[in-house]
Amino acid sequence: MSHSKIFSGNRALGYVSNHIPVVTRYIQRRKENLIVTCVGKAFHTYGCSHFTLLSVSGVHDGEITCMTADAYHIYTASDNKIYAWRRGSELKHTYKGHECPIHILHPFGPHLISIDEDSNLKLWDIRSEENVLELNFANSIFQITTIVHPSTYINKILLGSEQGQLQIWNLKSAKMIYTFKGWSSPVSVLEQAPAVDVIAIGLANGKIVLHNIKYDESIVEFIQDWGLVTSIAFRSDGHPIMATGSLAGHVVFWNLEQRKVDCQLLNAHFGAVTGLNSLPNEPLIVTSSPDNSLKLWIFDLADGGARLLRIREGHAEPPTFIRFHGSNGHNILSAGGDSSLRIFSTITETYNKSLGRASFNRKASKKKSRAVEDPLIMPPITLFTSESTREKDWDNVAALHLGLGVVTTWSYDKIKMGELKLLPDRFKHNPSATATSLCITHCGNFVIIGYSTGHVDRFNIQSGIHRATYGGENGGHTAPVSGVAVDTLNQFVITAGRDATIKFWSFKQTKDSSPRTVIEVKEPVEWLRTHAETSLIALALEDLSIILIDLDTRRLVRHFNGHTSRITDATFSPDARWLITASMDCTIRTWDIPSAQLIDIFSVEEACTSLHFSPTGEYLATSHVCNLGIYLWSNRTLYSHVSLTSITSDLSGPVLALPGSAPEPNQLSVDSEDRDGGENVEFVSPEQIHSKLITMSSLANSRWQNLLNIDIVKKRNKPKEAPKAPPAAPFFLPTIPSLEVQFDLGEATDKDQASKLLAPTNFDSLTVFGKLLQLSSETDDFSEVIERFKSLGPSAIDFEIQSLALHSGGSIVIMLQFLKMIRSMMKSKKDFELAQAYLGAFLKSHGETIAADQQLREYLPKVQKAQLASWTTLRDNLFYNLSVVQHLKRV
C-alpha cells in the first residue's frame, strides 16, 4: 500500500521564505506589486498591499535553486530543468538541456538566460522553448557567480566571476566585448544603478563599487563591516539611496550624493539578507532571509530611515512542540527553537500571529538597541500547556524552557508574553533544578509544575503565588518528574516520574503529604499525555512502549509495543478511540484503544518531534526534525469509507512525503495492494455473520415499512380531481358574423370516438415476478426471486402481491410458491424484517382466498412455525440485553 489508511497529506503551514532571493513583479492589470518567495519545492506569491498569500505553485521534483520573473512569467529552476509559470500556479513552459544544476536565471527580452554550476550559459526562446545560444566557461578560469543586463546595452550582458573578473558579452554575435580586471575579490552581486553605464558591484570582502562600465572607471567605493555583500537595491522614488544586505542580517542605506552612510537597519533579519528589492516609484523596500521571514520597510521616519511596515514570518528554527488551541481546531500554538511562541491558523495565513520571543526581561528587550544580539533571550521552549477557560481574564499559557527552572506565562488573548516567572523559593539559589513537566487545571486558575528534583508545586497563574507542594519538601518522587495531570473536577493530581511510579495526590493538599494511590510500572516514565473528556492518560516508558491508565479505576488498561526508537509524542483522537504515536524511528502509528490493536502506520523521511489531533478530528498536525513548518494531515475517515483492520506492529509502513504548502486533493481511491504483499485490504462484511444469527436487510426502512398501509398512502397522494382533456375542436372553425372575429363552437360537442387502445384477450398473463415464482416451483431456489423483490419499491411490491390473485392472472400454485418463499427467508434467518412485511401484505390482500383454499390453509402452519422460531430467537436476545442494561443501571 502506497498511502496511509487513515491520513493523507493536506498542506504545510509556517513557510514564508528561504535563502533564494525574493522576486518582485508589477502587474498592470492589478495595479499592484506582487512578491514571490521560495519555500523549498514550491514558491508563494503575495500581494504587496496586505501581504496576502495569493497563490502557491505546484511542487517541483527537487528543491528550487533560483528564481526570476518578467511581466508575463515566473521562472524557476530545479536541478537541471527550468519551468515558466503563469498566474503563480499554471505551468506553461519547461526548458531542458542543462546537465548540471542551474543556479542563475535572468530574463532577457523574449529570451531567458540560464547558467548552471559548470558555468555553461544557455539562451532560450521563451515561447518555442528552443535553445538559441550556448556559451561554455571553465570554472577554473571564469566561474560565473552573477549576471546583469546593463540598461541601454542592447544584446549585451555583464557577468561576474568567482575569480573577481567581469566580462561583457554580446549574445547576438556570441562574442566577448570587454574584460574588467576586478578588485581581487569574488563578485557576489551585480545591480544596475539609476544612472546609465553605472553598475553597482558587491564583493565578498564587503566592498561595494559603483563602476562606470563605459569608461572602466570606479566612481565611488563603500565598505560594509559585516563581510560579504549579499544583495544590493536602489530606491527609485527620487532619493539617491543605495541599500546593501549582509550575512549578519543588517541592511545599510548609503547616500550616493554625500557618499556616506545614511542610516542602518541592524538585525533586520536573524539570518543573511539574501533578498533585497526596492519597489518601483515607491518609498518601499522588501527583504527576505533564510530565517523564514518576509518584511516590507517604508521610508517615512524623520531622519529618512526605514521602519517595518508589514511582516510575514514563521519559525526561524524547527518547532519543538505544537498543540491545537480552542475547541474549533482553527489555531495551532507552536514553540520553536528560536525561543518564540507563535499561532498558526488553519484557515488563512492572514491570521498567523507571533506572541514574541521569550525574554528574561521583556520590557528591557523591547527597549534594547538592535545593534547586538539580545542577551536576555531565554532558551527555547520545550513544553507548554494552554487552557481557554479564562483566557480573557489572565495568562492562559505556561511554558518551560530548556535547562531552566523558571516557567513563563503567556497570554493568548493579548498575544504577548506575560509578566510572571514561576519559580519556588527553594530553587532561587539552585540553578541546577529544572522544570520538566507542567499542566494547567481545567478551571484555568492553577498551573502545576514538576521538577528534576522530584518536587511538584502548584501556583496560581493569575498572581503567580505559590499555593501547594505535593510530597512535602523532600519531593513527591525520588527522580525527575516526567509528567503531571489533573482531573477535570480538580479532585486529584497525577504525577509520573522516572522512578517508575505513578502517584495520585489530593488536589487540596493537607498536612498528610502521602499520595492516595501509587502505581508502579516496570520502566521509567518518559512523559504523560491526557485526554480532557475521558479518564484515560497515556504514558511513554523507557522500553519504547506506551501504557494507558484509567483514572477512575486507577489501573493499567492497555499496553502498546512496536516502536523501535524513542517515542517523541502521542495524542488521542477527539473521541478517545485512537492513540496516535510518533517516534524517532520515523514512523507514526495509530492504535485502536478498544481492540488494543495497531490499525495504521506510515513512515516519514524526517522523524516527527510533536503531533496533535484537532478537536474536530479534521486534521493531524505534526512537526519534524530540520523542518520549519507544521504539517497538516487530513483524516480520511471523515469523507470516505476506511476499513480499519488490525495490522502487525513490525511493519514500517509506506514512506509518505511531507505535504506541500498548497492543499492536496483528497486521496479517495483505495490501494488494492496490502502491505504484506498484494491482497485486498478492503474488508467486505459477509451477507450473514453466522447461520444461527438473525440478519436484517440493508434496505432503507421506507422500502418496507409502509407496505401494510400502502392503500392509505395512495389515497392521500391521489390528486383531488383527475385532469380533464380539452374539448376537441372541428378541423374548420366556423365563425360568428360580428365586428370581431369569434369562433362558433356551439356544434363542437363531445363525441364518443372509438378507443384506439386494444384490450388484451388473454387475462391469464403473469408479471415478471410471477413468472420467476412459477419457475422456482421446480427447484425451490428463491434467491433470484428474493433479489428481484428487494429491488422493487413499496408500490411495485404491492402491485406484484395483488397480481397473484386469481382474477388478476394468478393461481393457487403461484400463491403457494410465494408462501414457500417467505418460509425460506425465515428459515435462512436473512432479511428478517422484509419477510415479516411481505407476509403481512400477502395475508392482508389474500386472506379470503387462503381461508377458502385447503392447500393454502394446510401450508400456513409451516410458515407460522418458521416465523415463531425466528421471533423466539430475536425476542430472547432482546430480553437478555435489556436485563443486563437494567442491572447495570441499578449498580
Image (tube, helix red, strand yellow):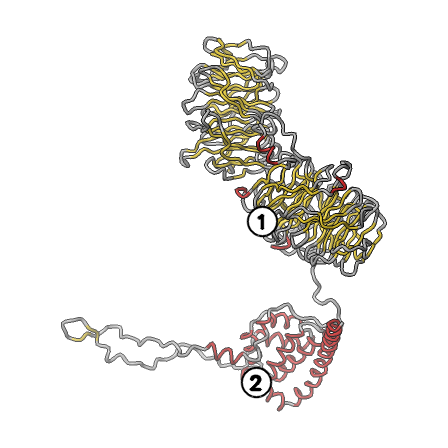
- The residue singled out by tag 1 in the image is 330
- Do we see residue 3 in this rendering? no
> Residue 629's spot in the image, x, y percent?
62, 39
Residue 620 horizontal side relative to residue 208, left or right: right
Residue at 53% across, 22% down: 252
Query: For the residue labelled by badge 1, is the local secondary structure a helix, a strand or a loop?
Result: loop
Residue 147 horizontal side relative to residue 723, left or right: right
- The residue singled out by tag 2 in the image is 806
The numbered dot on residue 416 is none
In front of the other: 510 or 685: 510
Residue 696 position by quadrant: bottom right
Residue at 73% across, 66% down: 689
Residue type at mark 2: give it.
Leu
In front of the other: 473 or 404: 473
In front of the other: 678 or 491: 491
Q: Residues within 10 Å of mark 2 (few under 14, many from 20)?
A: some
- Do we see residue 120 in this rendering? yes
As drawn, the residue found furthest toward the left would be 739
Q: Residues within 10 Å of mark 1 (few under 14, many from 20)?
A: some
Residue type at mark 1: give it.
His
